[in-house]
Image (spheres, rainbow, N blue to C red):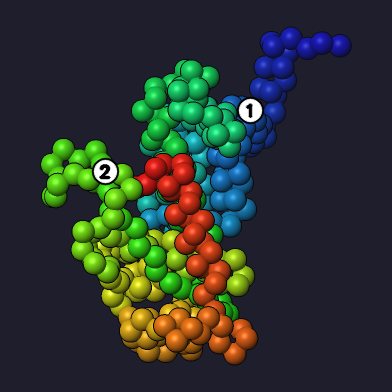
Amino acid sequence: MKLSKEDIKSYLLTLPDQEQSAFIDELRDLSNSSTSPRCKLSRREMLNNKQGACPHCGHPKYVKLGFDKGAQRYKCKSCKRNFTEYTGTWMAGIHKKDKIDEYMLLMLEEKSLDKIKKELKINKKTAFDWRHKILSSLDETGKDPFTGITESDETVMLLSEKGKRSLSRKGRKRGTKAKKRGISDEQVSIIVTADRAGQKELSVATLGRIKKIDIEKSIGGRICDKTVLCSDSHVSYKGFAIGNSLEHHAIRADLKQYVKDGLYHVQHVNSMHNKLKKWLNEQFWGV
């Protein structure tokens, strides 16, 4: 037997007020779930299961506070501020959230911005902005402390000012070398760090030679009492290790020492240096 809309409406009116409200809430949740992106629903599920925290103050106690334009709203019990499932994520403030899942699939398929723009009927600038918001959010997650033997070493690459309207020097042809001997401010120092558990960190440190403060900025927030630092004999690494009370093993490549005690070396990060330079030079023709 098929019920008409009027029959359903009449039946609902016979229910107690509390049951009517509960039924309406279930319908609203179902409606929102059918149109919401999966990445948004996973965030909502996490918050609803008390696995999140207030994005304003970090307090773990919060309660539901209805919906705001289809988004579940919450209220923090500590700072009393409201937030939604988007607050504090890369999805906050963007429009056309219904296209997020499709966009992420196209991005994983390594589609170009022009193809994504055509497929989703969005502006190319929007596609560009979303890509960088997603990449920035990924960069902020999954960074556990370095544990065990942690190799760290810097590599240098020639600084390129291609595309700048006013160069600080005379232009040069691609492939030429620096005019100054040794490591100078014509080169960019990149610190590469990796532990044997697979945690990695690559960061552009400074122009010219690195200092203790550059190492601190690069990996200072990711060390712990279980970190065993392994590096070359550069004085900056020695100072960093002493300042952070780390066990430090310096490799003296100038004395043809490449492995210490059969265990300590920086060969993994040196391999990453080679892969990084090869990738940059072959894919982008330098930086």
Q: Residue furthest right?
A: 1
Rendered view: 259 above or below 213:
below
Q: Amino acid at mark 1?
A: Ser
Residue at image location 50% in from the left, 85% down from the top? 257
Left or right placement of residue 40 versus residue 132 in this view: right
Residue 92 at x, y percent in the picture? 41, 40
Residue at image location 56% in from the left, 30% down from the top? 106
Quarter holding the N terminus is top right
Residue nearer the viewer, 67 or 235: 235
Q: What is the crowding at mark 2: few (fewer than 14 residues within 10 Å), some, or many (at least 20)?
A: few
Q: Amino acid at mark 2?
A: Lys
Rendered view: 264 above or below 188:
below
Circle 1 SS class: helix
Any mark on residue 70, and which?
none
Rendered view: 7 above or below 65:
above
- Distance Cα–Cα, label 2 vs label 1: 56 Å
Residue 170 at x, y percent in the picture? 14, 47
Residue 265 at x, y percent in the picture? 54, 79
Give the residue at mark 2.
173
The image quarter containing residue 142 is bottom right
Rendered view: 7 above or below 36:
above
The image quarter containing residue 231 is bottom left
- Residue 216 in view: yes
- Residue 24 in view: no
The image quarter containing residue 4 is top right
Residue at image location 50% in from the left, 22% down from the top? 115
Residue nearer the viewer, 234 or 42: 234
Residue 189 at x, y percent in the picture? 33, 64
Dot 2 or dot 1: first in sequence order is 1
Any mark on residue 34, and which?
1
